[in-house]
Image: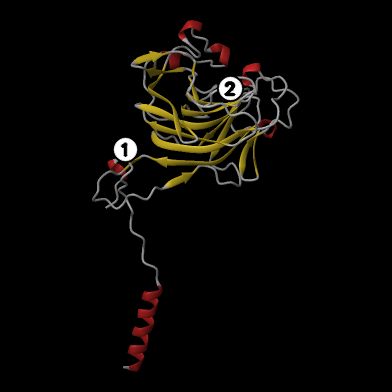
């Protein structure tokens, strides 16, 4: 009898010490860190003229918990346009990150690429790029740094192989300026993008909404309709696959960091998936989801 009581007490203590399993808080945001702060695991690299995941001259590197796009090993930029793609595509999400331009532009870089970089949204995958392709078909959140003379807004939208709707009209302008302030020097800038599938994309800088556009879609040649198709000039050897998709809206795609001759640092790259189970009876329901994915529900 005494032995039974002793075992019962031990079992009770073990149960009392075991932490209760946390319940799902539908209002608690579950952010995903796209960068682990240590290495480039989870990212694919494609640089024009180089094989997939050939990190030519260590262009993309990790240092001091930052992703750095570096040209310290370059004598001249050449045509080594590069992008580094996160491993998973997303559709409805909020992306946040900090960036800063540093130092001087790499010799050989185009004049327009001075303090110029970007984050590609709804992009094709790294593996689907042609060998000499300079830019992926995507919607670019263009990042510009001030040049110390006049206004130069950041978080603009550029459209390699794509177009967007502005004021109810498809706008084939290659780059459309935001209303952001100019950020001179090597200061950190906080950027956000709210991407809602093929409905809309919103660019936010330092808490201010600076640009909203709608219905991102394939089309307009590679740069614009006024310049003609232009696909071959950017290393795309099979433009027909894109031309036949003219007008197709982009519902999802990859996120890619751009390397186009000016050193830039990225940190605190996080994503909040807005697509998930919207059934309040499910264990994994979240109040902030805006796109329902019933197949993800857990009961």
Give the image location of residue 36, x and y in percent.
Answer: 55, 46
Quick one: SS at disc 2?
loop
- Residue at (45, 40) in percent of width and height: 271
Q: Which of marks 1 and 2 is in front?
A: 1
- Residue at (42, 35) in percent of width and height: 90
Q: Residue furthest bottom?
A: 2
Instruction: Tell me whether circle 1 and circle 2 mark residues in contact (CB < 8 Å).
Output: no
Give the image location of residue 152, x and y in percent.
Answer: 57, 22
Q: Which of 157 and 83 is in front in this view?
A: 157
Q: Distance between the residues labelled 1 and 2?
A: 37 Å
Q: Assess disc 2: are there few (<14), some (14-19) or many (≥20) residues with their C-alpha within 10 Å of its C-alpha.
A: some
Q: Mark 2 points at which residue?
A: 131
- Residue at (57, 15) in percent of width and height: 234
Give the image location of residue 261, x and y in percent.
Answer: 65, 25
Q: Nearer the viewer, residue 205 or 9?
A: 205
Q: Residue furthest right?
A: 75
Location of residue 235 with respect to 65 vertically, above or below: above
Q: Which of 83 and 107 is in front in this view?
A: 107
Residue 25 as seen in the image, left or right of residue 180? left
- Say which label, 1 or 2, has the lower sequence index: 2
Q: Residue furthest front?
A: 150
Residue 274 as seen in the image, left or right of residue 227? left
The answer to which image quadrant residue 17 occupies is: bottom left
Tag shown at residue 158: none
Quick one: SS at disc 1?
loop
Q: Look at the image and tell me in which quarter the N terminus lies.
A: bottom left
Give the image location of residue 98, x and y in percent.
Answer: 55, 38
Could you tell me how many numbered marks the image carries?
Answer: 2
Q: Mark 1 points at which residue?
A: 290
- Residue at (48, 6) in percent of width and height: 226
Q: Assess disc 1: are there few (<14), some (14-19) or many (≥20) residues with their C-alpha within 10 Å of its C-alpha.
A: some
The answer to which image quadrant residue 147 occupies is: top right
């Amino acid at each position: 009898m005494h032995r039974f009581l002793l075992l019962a007490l031990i079992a009770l203590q073990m149960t009392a010490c075991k932490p209760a399993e946390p319940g799902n808080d539908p209002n608690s945001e579950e952010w995903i860190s796209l960068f682990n702060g240590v290495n480039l695991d989870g990212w694919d690299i494609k640089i024009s003229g180089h094989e997939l995941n050939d990190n030519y001259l260590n262009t993309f590197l990790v240092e001091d918990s930052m992703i750095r796009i570096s040209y310290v090993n370059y004598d001249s930029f050449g045509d080594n346009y590069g992008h580094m793609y996160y491993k998973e595509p997303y559709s409805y999400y909020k992306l946040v990150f900090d960036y800063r331009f540093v130092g001087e532009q790499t010799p050989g870089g185009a004049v327009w690429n001075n303090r110029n970089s970007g984050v590609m949204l709804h992009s094709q995958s790294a593996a689907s790029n042609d060998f000499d392709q300079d830019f992926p078909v995507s919607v670019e959140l263009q990042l510009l740094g001030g040049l110390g003379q006049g206004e130069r807004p950041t978080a603009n939208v550029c459209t390699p192989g794509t177009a967007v709707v502005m004021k109810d009209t498809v706008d084939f302008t290659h780059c459309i300026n935001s209303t952001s302030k100019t950020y001179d020097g090597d200061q950190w800038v906080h950027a956000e993008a709210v991407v809602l599938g093929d409905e809309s994309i919103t660019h936010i800088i330092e808490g201010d909404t600076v640009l909203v556009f709608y219905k991102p879609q394939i089309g307009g040649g590679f740069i614009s309709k006024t310049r003609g198709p232009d696909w071959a000039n950017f290393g795309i050897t099979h433009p027909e696959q894109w031309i036949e998709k003219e007008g197709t809206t982009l519902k999802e795609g990859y996120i890619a960091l751009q390397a186009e001759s000016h050193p830039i640092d990225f940190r605190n790259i996080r994503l909040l998936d807005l697509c998930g189970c919207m059934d309040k009876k499910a264990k994994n329901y979240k109040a902030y989801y805006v796109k329902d994915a019933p197949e993800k529900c857990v009961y």
